[in-house]
Image (cartoon, rainbow, N blue to C red):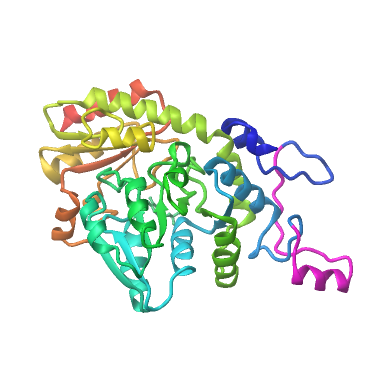
Amino acid sequence: MTRSRRTRTNLVHGGTRRSQYNEVSEAIFLTQGFVYDSAEDAEARFIKAGDDEFIYARYGNPTVRMFEERIALLEGAEDAFATASGMAAVNGALTSMLQAGDHLVSARALFGSCLYIVDDILTRFGVEVTLVDGTDLDQWRAAIRPDTKAVFFESMSNPTLEIIDIAAVSELAHAVGALVVVDNVFATPVYSRALDLGADVVIYSGTKHIDGQGRTLGGVILGSKEYIRKTVEPYMKHTGGSMSPFTAWVMLKGLETIDLRVRAQTQSAGAIAEALQNHPKLAGVVYPGHASHPQYDLVQSQMGAGGTMLAIELKGGQEESFRLLNALEIIIISNNLGDAKSIVTHPATTTHQRLTEEQRAELGISRGLIRLSVGIEDPQDLIDDLLQALEAV
Ligand SMILES: *Cc1c(COP(=O)(O)O)cnc(C)c1O
């Protein structure tokens, strides 16, 4: 019934479970455990819990279940498992499906912690990993083998905002029966068509656009019912990466407004990209929704919009970048993204500091590169702030 409703209706009502009090706003079931009517009832529930029966919050909780059902509706997924952070989701999605001897192909341009899981942890447990330049389909073609078990990539890379073609990589992976796992954080759940385009598993850090107001850490793994309940759930419930009911409540409320927020942020990002074009202090402006982006057509077919993130490159390297950051009056210096507040980050000295100079060069992360996450402030105030700060550079 809820499936036939449109997205914005589902984001407000989808997955709602009301208690005997018929509350309007979703309840926070802040409880680890649940009381059984009898010893027989306890035994029966441990054998097989029904959809509305819970055992222990690490396994599932009514507030968490509401969040899982609501985001599954948004993504068009059969099921979802909510996790304690985005990284718990990445780790859970990959580790639960892989074992020693398996082969994984992954894009190289990954969030630092994602690269750590792929390149340090999985390899330590005997998974063979091949890293490729995710935008180069020939590299995927060469790396994917008949025994490849899965492929993994971020659909939009951080911080250089390159797009990986979900449909094309999925076709190559599915030809050998490999599963396609997409970290879709930068694309946002609002512009995601990942499952339609061929992905088998989609992951979000809920910390970003889903919370959207910088309060809680959380994540989610989405996919088929079979994969979520038979592969992910046993791994997550026994290893402890489950989402807390309080976090689930914050993220449920975040989902109510995500469509409005992300579309407004995207519109502002487009206006900022336009306003900064050809600025004399800038070597370049990268915005996936601007016609100047080298993969503009792919962005349009894959996401339909450019998203909430921009990258700008200063001609004057780190010195000018720092001056720009320090001159901003509204936009804050931090490292979250997808927040209601606009945030600037200098990746080379913060989020990507751990990489060597060569690794950064390979990923296009120069000392003049600044990442901007556009918030919901008045876009003209953001443009004015950036222009006055560029003046000060
Ligand atoms: C932030 C982020 C993560 C990790 O999410 P946390 O909630 O911080 O654990 C994973 N992938 C991408 C692309 C991210 O931006």
The image quadrant of residue 253 is top right
Tell me the quadrant of the picture where the C terminus can be found. top left
Between 344 and 35, the one nearer to me in the picture: 35
Residue 31 magenta-highlighted: yes
- Rendered residue at 11%/27% (across/down): 280
- Rendered residue at 56%/68% (across/down): 240
The image quadrant of residue 178 is bottom left
Q: Which residues are magenta?
A: 25-50
Q: Position of residue 8 (x, y in %)?
A: 58, 31
Secondary structure, magenta segment, majority class: loop
Inspect this view and state whether residue 221 appears.
Answer: yes
Give the answer, above or below, for where 1 lies relative to 217: above
Give the answer, above or below, for where 165 lies relative to 115: above
Between 55 and 44, the one nearer to me in the picture: 44
Looking at this rendering, what residue extends furthest in the right direction? 38
The image quadrant of residue 24 is top right
Give the answer, above or below, for where 329 lies relative to 196: above
- Taking 27 as reference, is 333 left or right? left
- Rendered residue at 31%/56% (across/down): 110
Give the answer, above or below, for where 53 lies relative to 126: above
Residue 177 magenta-highlighted: no
- Rendered residue at 70%/66% (across/down): 56
Inspect this view and state whether residue 306 appears.
Answer: no
Tell me the quadrant of the picture where the N terminus can be found. top right
Between 180 and 57, the one nearer to me in the picture: 180
Q: Position of residue 36 (x, y in %)?
A: 84, 66
Task: Tally the numbered discs.
Answer: 0
Q: Position of residue 27 (x, y in %)?
A: 72, 46
